[in-house]
């Protein structure tokens, strides 16, 4: 077991390209996220465009434990990237073997590794050589397409290589996000490997997370789209976990009553304000207001007059506009 990184049931923030930057990771950590993964970073980028690539890996003391997710297709290049990052103080590394985006797969990286397990193995070995034991994990899907499920083979390989965790999103690469995540395959993977499995896929709420664990026996879960919509999901999950800790988590059928709506919305407004402060402090966008438009529109779902406020959100042009919008939302809640 990895010190700190794998603690049973402790929730992870999934890697989210374009979203899981330092401000968002810190927002999630303040709500109870235990382990966060960076956006995927190109191993090649660390060679050819070092300064720019390192901007994706900015971190602070509070942003720990942090896992750097790398993508690429060349074992030497990825091994070297791990060595460079380790010298800079990063400790944990994840290999992206699940991204179905053409830009990544066309050179053999991301989910294309599911079609070439020899290559996958050699990359993982060179990462472990560079990082040491208990420092390297892999994020996978079921396989490239439904004719070629390889997750059980990867589970076996991961056991032999002493991989520290498998992040598992049980859809085929070709599926993208269509259909439902096949949680039953998480259960099968757990039965076939002794490597800790972190479940991913359609885990949008605290209840989903506990249901997934109880159905699959996964070691923990990662929140992805659920966290993007509402970072409070980490707090809700931990509260639910605490409440259920006297029960056997395997036997849970979870139904949680929502907290009082007003308090809940005020908490959400606090999250929004925190995110804004962290963007001001650590954001790396040339125009942070543009990024905020999307963030506000996501967070303001579910509020009274949400359509009206979300339309305002996508038009904000200045910090004053942002403050005015939040003040109106808050007045509406109270
Ligand atoms: C916007 C977005 C960006 C993502 N970026 C990455 C990534 O960089 N690396 C990765 O392994 N998975 C990435 N994923 C996949 C998620 O980590 C996660 O496995 C997937 O969204 C399923 O979880 P969910 O149904 O709870 O959203 C991304 C997903 C989304 C929606």
Image (cartoon, rainbow, N blue to C red):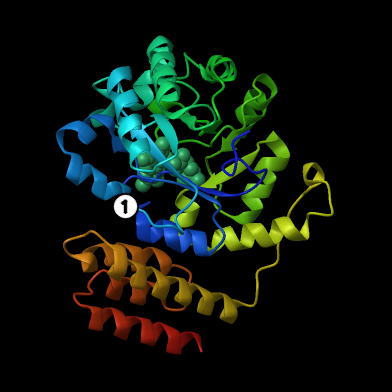
Please report the residue visible at 44 percent of the width from the left and 15 percent of the height from the top.
121
User: What secondary structure is found at the residue carrying circle 1?
Assistant: loop
Image location of residue 218, percent across then percent down: 66, 36
Q: Can residue 74 be seen in this view?
A: no
Identity of the residue drawn at 34% across and 37% down: 87
Q: Residues within 10 Å of mark 1 (few under 14, many from 20)?
A: some
Q: Which of 282 and 204 is in front in this view?
A: 282
Q: Mark 1 points at which residue?
A: 58
Q: Nearer the viewer, residue 60 or 95?
A: 60
Q: Considering depth in this image, is 152 or 128 the residue closer to the camera?
A: 128
Residue 188 placed where, x, y %?
66, 24
Q: How many labels does the image show?
A: 1
- In which quadrant of this rendering is ligand 1 seen? top left
Residue at disc 1, CB closer than 8 Å to ligand 1: no
Q: Vertically, is 110 above or below 330?
A: above
Residue 324 placed where, x, y %? 30, 85
Q: Position of residue 73 (x, y in %)?
A: 30, 21
> What is the quadrant of residue 82 in the picture?
top left
Residue displayed at 56% across by 52% down: 34
Q: In this view, does 106 lie to the left or right of 88?
A: left
Residue situated furthest top in the rendering? 118
Going 56% across and 47% down the picture, which residue do you hit? 203
Residue 4 can be seen, yes or no: yes
Along the line of sight, the residue nearer the viewer: 11 or 302: 11
Quadrant holding the N terminus:
top right
Compared across the picture, whether 198 is left or right of 321 comes to right
């Amino acid at each position: 077991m990895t010190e700190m990184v794998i603690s049973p049931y402790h929730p992870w923030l999934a890697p989210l390209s374009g979203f899981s930057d330092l401000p968002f990771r810190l927002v999630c950590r303040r709500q109870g996220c235990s382990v966060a993964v960076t956006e995927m970073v190109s191993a090649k980028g660390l060679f050819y465009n070092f300064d720019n690539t390192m901007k994706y890996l900015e971190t602070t003391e509070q942003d720990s434990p942090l896992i750097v997710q790398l993508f690429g297709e060349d074992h030497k290049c990825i091994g070297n990237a791990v060595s460079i990052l380790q010298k800079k103080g990063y400790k944990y590394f994840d290999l992206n073997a699940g991204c179905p985006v053409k830009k990544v797969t066309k050179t053999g990286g991301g989910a294309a590794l599911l079609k070439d397990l020899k290559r996958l193995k050699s990359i993982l070995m060179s990462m472990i050589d560079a990082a040491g034991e208990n420092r390297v994990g892999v994020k996978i899907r079921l396989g490239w397409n439904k004719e070629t499920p390889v997750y059980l083979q990867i589970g076996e390989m991961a056991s032999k290589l002493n991989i520290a965790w498998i992040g598992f999103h049980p859809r085929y690469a070709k599926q993208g996000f269509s259909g439902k995540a096949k949680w039953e395959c998480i259960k099968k993977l757990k039965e076939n490997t002794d490597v800790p499995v972190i479940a991913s896929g359609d885990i949008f709420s605290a209840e989903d997370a506990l249901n997934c664990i109880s159905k699959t026996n996964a070691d923990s879960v990662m929140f992805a789209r659920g966290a993007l919509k509402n970072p409070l999901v980490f707090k809700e999950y931990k509260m639910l976990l605490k409440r259920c800790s006297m029960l056997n988590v395997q036997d849970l059928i979870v139904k949680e009553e929502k907290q009082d709506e007003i308090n809940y919305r005020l908490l959400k407004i606090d999250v929004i304000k925190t995110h804004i402060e962290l963007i001001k402090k650590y954001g790396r966008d040339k125009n942070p207001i543009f990024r905020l438009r999307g963030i506000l529109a996501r967070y303001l779902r579910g509020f009274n007059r949400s359509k009206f406020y979300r339309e305002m959100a996508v038009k904000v042009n200045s910090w004053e506009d942002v403050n005015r919008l939040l003040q109106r939302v808050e007045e509406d809640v109270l």
